[in-house]
Image: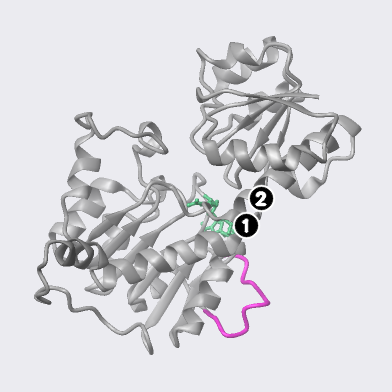
Amino acid sequence: MKIVFYDTKPYDKESFEKCLKTYSDITIEFEEADLNERTAVLAKGADAVCAFVNSNLGTEVIDRLHEEGVGCILLRCAGFNNVDLNRAKEYDMEVLRVPGYSPEAVAEHAMTLALGVNRHLHKSYIRVRENNFSLGGLTGINFYKKTAGIIGTGKIGAAMCRICRGFGMEVIAYDMYPNKDLDFVTYMSLDEVLSRSDLLSLHCPLTKETYHLINKDTIAKMKDNVILINTSRGALVATNDLIQGIRDRKFFGVGLDVYEEEGSNVFENREDEVLEHSTTARLLSFPNVIVTSHQGFLTEEALQAISETTLKNAMDYVNGTIDNYNRV
Ligand code: NAD
């Protein structure tokens, strides 16, 4: 089986090559370019393409992949909002993903962002490096005995609930399907979670229903001085409304691992460029906002699990033994 692997980064190549040793039937052609209408042609003659969160898997790209003979899309991530699933279905093209490689990796990053903005770590790090040992403006709050509101309690949200409980927080949550394993979590309506939480963390997928879930109306329902964390998908948050909320001093802090417009930035070094998107630049200008570049998944354990499941998906596709759980 031949796989064309798009948007290859050194850590991807390292973990996939290590795992490939146990799969003699698979060859991988690693491409630095990400998948789009122009680069789809690189997949000529391949059985499958391997793509990531910001790869373009829209209608035209799927048409091109079909023309090139590709029968399977291997997503090396959990989310699949970037795939035109209807088009893939028309061609009987399989779309397989890695639903839960390491939920703790993302949840731990969500808590990292929450602690970082709370204790102004981004500022204190720079200050001390400049021999400035003053503490003005660095006051945070205790998380102990505060309320954590988790929106979406699937695998990652559940891990975040457990972490928050470990901090001695009261944990409340909103999900249409309450997770029975989380007996320490109190489920409530979305409005109640918004209005009662000191720390709000988003862990639901991006769907038509959750697009701009955080907007000016939902922000108005939040407690003043709330900390908002988004490690899920950028478009869960209406960025302009968030910016207005930050200007209105609604937020104690905001931590974003994902944001709208991240597509052209994610995993790229653009340090010599002038960023053309003013909303991202505006977000970065606020002192109580920390933005990371979609790195929630980036732990050794998660990378290993991603490569193992992706290659198992590839073999299952060839052998006709696809695990429905991994099928989108
Ligand atoms: P999951 O499918 O296990 O859980 C998602 C949960 O969200 C489910 O319990 C579902 O019922 C709930 N949900 C769906 N619609 C909802 C709504 N409208 N309101 C409230 N809850 C709703 O998914 P997961 O593995 O926990 O991943 C969650 C998301 O995290 C993924 O969709 C992906 O976008 C994101 N993610 C980010 C990174 C990263 O590196 N930052 C890595 C992996 C996943």
Q: Which residue is labeled 2 in the image? A: 304
Q: In this view, does 68 lie to the left or right of 168?
A: right
**Rendered-image quadrant of the C terminus:** top right
What x and y, as percent, mark residue 44?
68, 11
Quarter occupied by the N terminus: top right
Q: Main secondary structure of the magenta part?
A: loop
Tell me if residue 291 comes above or below residue 113 in the rendering. Answer: above
Ligand 1 closer than 8 Å to label 2 CB: no
Left or right of residue 112, residue 86 in this image:
right
Identify which amino acid the numbered label 1 is placed on. Glu
Q: Residue drawn at (68%, 43%), measured in percent from left and top?
A: 307
Q: In this view, does 109 lie above or below 145?
A: above
Q: Residue 112, which numbered label?
A: none
- The residue tagged 1 is 301
Q: Do the residues labelled 1 and 2 touch (CB within 8 Å)?
A: yes
Find the magenta span and give its range. Answer: 176-186
